[in-house]
Image: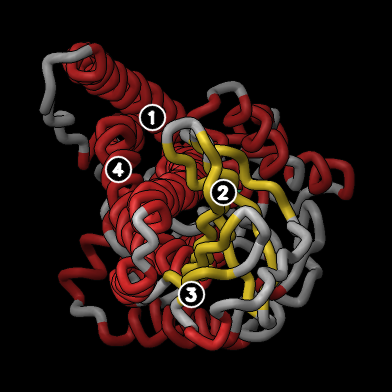
Amino acid sequence: MGIEEKGTGPGGIERRVGVGIHLKLFGFLLPLVILLIVSVTLMATEVTKSTLRRDLLQRGAAVSRVVALFAGHSMLSNDPLGLDRLVSETRASDPNIAFVAIRDTSDIVVAHDRVTERGKPYHPVPPLLPLGTFGDTRADEVVRDGRRLIEYTTPISFAGRRVGIASIGLSMEGLAAAQRSIQQRIYAAAAIILVAAFFGTLLLSSFITTPVKRLHQGVLSLANSETFQSVPVRSSDELGALTGNFNRMAETILAQKTALQKKALQLEEAYISMVRVIAASLDARDPYTMGHSTRVARMSCALGRRLGMDEEELSNVERAAIFHDLGKIQTPDDVLLKGERLSRAEEERMKNHPIDGSEILRMAPFLHRYIPVVRAHHEWYNGEGYPDGIKGDEIPLHAQLIALADAFDAMTTDRPYRHALSTEAAISEILRFRGTQFSPELADAFAKMMREMPPSDETMLKSMAL
Ligand SMILES: [Fe+2]
């Protein structure tokens, strides 16, 4: 799922395309899901805190009204014990209640949960923040004795006459603790949902992109038809239909590709057969070189096999060897068949045959691969050959094999101006030119091969038959 590297597969198909679609989809969905969860969490926290605050305010106001109601009876019936019991029981009913005070219309405290306050004037504190009114009860946020409180003030009335005021203080610490507790629970739930959302998003993006990935693999597989396998159709939706159509299209393409390859092979074989015939005809122009190309091909391949070449490479060596003197078709008979030493001009004309051969092969695109070898079969290892004067490893290996076989065959066949050399004499000549005309290693390998070759094989190599 990481960053993918670019590359080109068989048939020019783009194998990787930067960041994968899976990662892109995941990267697109995950921030959205996180944003949604965080927004919902913050909203839920705010709504819950607000609800808790409102409930607390209403609950405190209700308590204040109840205290005022009962205090009215006790005050009219002049029952100080009843008032004391009312304030102490109210104070004990909830640990968040900080104080309960009842005062008369002169603001003298007639009952208080702290008995020392009784009979003293009630000291109001300025409100920090008015929190609203609930019926006849007013709520304010205040700081009393260093503590933040919600102070409720409810008038005590009886029969339409005000007889006093009830005040209770409710600690805000309880509200803050309740808000912290609910906030922690919401955050814990949000964390669990976030983890689940991460894996859910991963799973969802995988679910969406897997069919696309399979199709991508199918396209790559199609480009390399040897390993193509139908893409499994796993759904009946549009992607499933697309996959099915892709499989049918791939089968059609593969069938056409196979037919085309077969035709191309047949065409190439026909062309090569034609060139073989031309090469044989060319050899036949000169009775002294009859079968030369075939013998050079056999010896080159025998050496290539000893060097460990596979069958495909040997086939290329064999064809290049058949074509190597094709350019001589443009060499006039009076030069090609001249029985005596060539003039400088004739020699130059003769030396043009590697270039002529290359130009003939250039006419057929599928024979282009043999051009470098045909062009270089008269190059020397030390750079003194022709037509380009390249040397050492610059000379294609196949051309170096053909050059050895060419020289050996020329020496071991009769020529108008000399008799054929013996095998051993020709090998000695090859070795004499190791490091100058021929690569030392290849010359040694060729000499070793010819010396180790049983006479029957040597006869076969020198046979003229195609
Ligand atoms: Fe040649």
Residue tagged by mark 4? 206
- From the viewer's side, name the closer residue of 216 and 56: 56
Residue 18 location (% of width, % of height): 57, 46
| C-alpha separation, residue under disc 4 versus residue under disc 2 | 21 Å
Mark 1 or mark 2: whose residue is earlier in sequence: 2
- Residue 112 is tagged as 3
Q: Can the viewer see residue 215?
A: yes
Q: Which label lies toward us, 2 or 3? A: 3
Q: Is mark 2 within 8 Å of ligand 1?
A: no
Mark 4 or mark 2: whose residue is earlier in sequence: 2
Mark 2 or mark 3: whose residue is earlier in sequence: 2
Residue 296 location (% of width, % of height): 42, 56
Residue 4 location (% of width, % of height): 51, 53
| C-alpha separation, residue under disc 2 versus residue under disc 3 | 83 Å
What amino acid does circle 2 point to?
A: Lys
- Whether 212 is drawn above or below 193: the answer is above
Q: Residue at x 61, y 40 (%)?
A: 132
Graded by Cα atoms within 10 Å as few (under 14), some (14 to 19) or many (20 or more), the crowding at tag 3 reads: many
| C-alpha separation, residue under disc 1 versus residue under disc 2 | 39 Å
Residue tagged by mark 2? 6
Graded by Cα atoms within 10 Å as few (under 14), some (14 to 19) or many (20 or more), the crowding at tag 4 reads: some
Residue tagged by mark 1? 272
Mark 1 or mark 4: whose residue is earlier in sequence: 4
Graded by Cα atoms within 10 Å as few (under 14), some (14 to 19) or many (20 or more), the crowding at tag 1 reads: some
Q: Look at the numbered disc 1 and give the secondary structure of its residue.
A: helix
Residue 207 in the figure: left or right of residue 416? left
Residue 295 location (% of width, % of height): 36, 54
